[in-house]
Image (tube, rainbow, N blue to C red):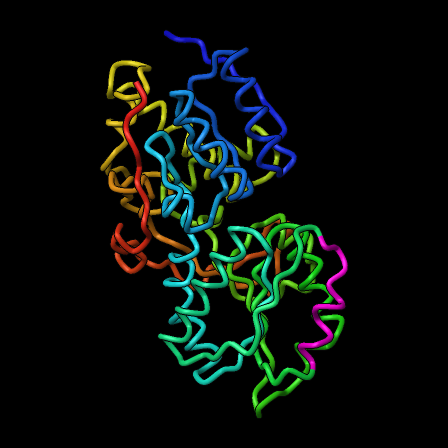
Amino acid sequence: GMKVEYVTGDTQTKSDAARASAKRMIEKDGVIMFSGGSSSGVAIAVQALAEEMGTIFMAGLTHSNDTTGKDRRRHGFRHMFNCHQSALALRPVLKNEYGSERQVYHLTADYTWGWSQQDSIEKGMAAEANWNTVANVKTPVGAGDFSQYITPILNSGADVLVLNHYGKDMVNSLTQAIQFGLLHKQVNGKDFQIVVPLFSRLMAQGAGENIKGIIGSTGWNWSLQDAGSQAFTKSFGQEYGFPPSQAAHTCYCQTLLYADAVERAGTFDPVQVIKALEDHNFDGMGNGPSLYRGADHQVFKNVLVVRGNQNPSSQFDLLSVVDIVDRDKVTYSPDLYAGDLGPYKV
C-alpha cells in the first residue's frame, strides 16, 4: 500500500561529490535507502555517510575488498562480489588456460579498487600456479592514453599483462595493448596473454573486437538459463528493448532485497531492516543460493568466469560463460580482512 518515490544524484565518480549529493537527498528529500556507487571509492565514502545519517546504503558496482573489509559499515550491504572472490574464481581457469610459471606485468588503476584487484590476483595466481609479478605500475584514473605505460612491457620479460582497469580505462588500455601487438608476441617460449579480472558488458561493447578471447569475471550474465535470470531478462527486455547488464541486475537485486527485508521486518526502521538482512539466505536471483553474511555484510553467491565471445550473435552477446563457480569456492573467513561494522545507528 505504500507509494515508492525516488530521487537521483550524480556522484561524478568523486567521493566528496557523492557524499554531498547523498547527504542532500537524505536531508532534503527524506531518503531512507539509497543505492549506487559504481566506483569503490565513492561507495566507501557514501557507505560511511549512511551510517552517520542512520540510513541504509545498498551498494551497487563496488568490487574493492575494502568495501566489506576494512571499511565495512553496519548500514551498508553489498550484493556485488569482491576482488578476492574474482581471484578465487579465476585461479583454476587461468592456470588451466595459460599454465604455470608465468611472468606477469600489472597495470593498476591508482585507487582502492585497483590496488585491491591487483593484490588479490597477484597473491591468488602465485599460490595457484607460481605466477611471478615482474612489475606493478599504477596508472591515474581516466588516463586516456596508456601508450607510455604499455611500451615498457615490450622489454620487461613479462608474458602476461593483467589490466586492473575498469570502464573506459580498460577499454583504452586493452585496445592500445593490442595495437602494440602484445597478443601476437611470444615471450619466454609462450604466447603472450592479456587478462581483465573484472568485466562489464559496457566495457566489452567499448572494446569491440579486442575483447574476443579475453578472460575475466563478472557477477551475472543475461544468458543464464535459471528461472530467476530468465524472468528478469524477459521483463527488462520488454521494458527497455535490450537485455539487462550486470549493473542493472546488481542494483535491481539490491532494491528487491531491501523491499523484502522491509516486509519481513514489518517496518522501515533502519535498525530492524538491517537485522532482517543480516545472515539472510535467499535464492531465485540468478546466482544460486545466496547469503548476506552478518559478520561483514558481504554477499556470497556463485561467480561467473567469462571469455570475450569469438562469434557474438548481437551487440549484447559479447561474453560467453566459461565457468559458474559455486559460492562455496569463493567463500572466505570474515577475519581475512580487518574491519568493524560498528553499532546500529538509532
Where residue 238 sits, quadrant-wise, is: top right
Asked whether residue 222 appears in the rendered view, the answer is yes
Q: Residue furthest bottom?
A: 189
The answer to whether 282 appears left or right of 237 in the picture is left
Q: Main secondary structure of the magenta part?
A: helix
The foreground one among 296 and 233 is: 296
Q: Nearer the viewer, residue 159 or 47?
A: 47
Magenta highlight on residue 284? no
Can residue 309 be seen in this snapshot? no
Residue 25: % across, % down: 54, 17
Count numbered badges in the picture. Answer: 0
Percent from the top left, x then y, of residue 168? 68, 51
Q: Is residue 137 left or right of residue 276?
A: right
Image quarter of the C terminus: top left
Q: Write the residue at 56% across / 51% down.
A: 111
- Identify which residue is drawn at 60% across, 24% down: 9
Residue at image coords 38%, 71%? 92
The magenta stretch is 143-154
Which quadrant of the figure contains the N terminus? top left
Of residue 301 and residue 104, the one placed in the foreground of this image is 104
**Picture quadrant of residue 84:** bottom left
Residue displayed at 47% across by 25% down: 34
**x, y (%) of residue 198?**
52, 56
Up the image or down, 190 lies above or below 168; here it is: below
Q: Is residue 211 above or below residue 74?
A: below
Residue 148 picture location, percent across and down: 75, 68
In the image, residue 218 sits, relative to residue 243, either above or below, namely: below
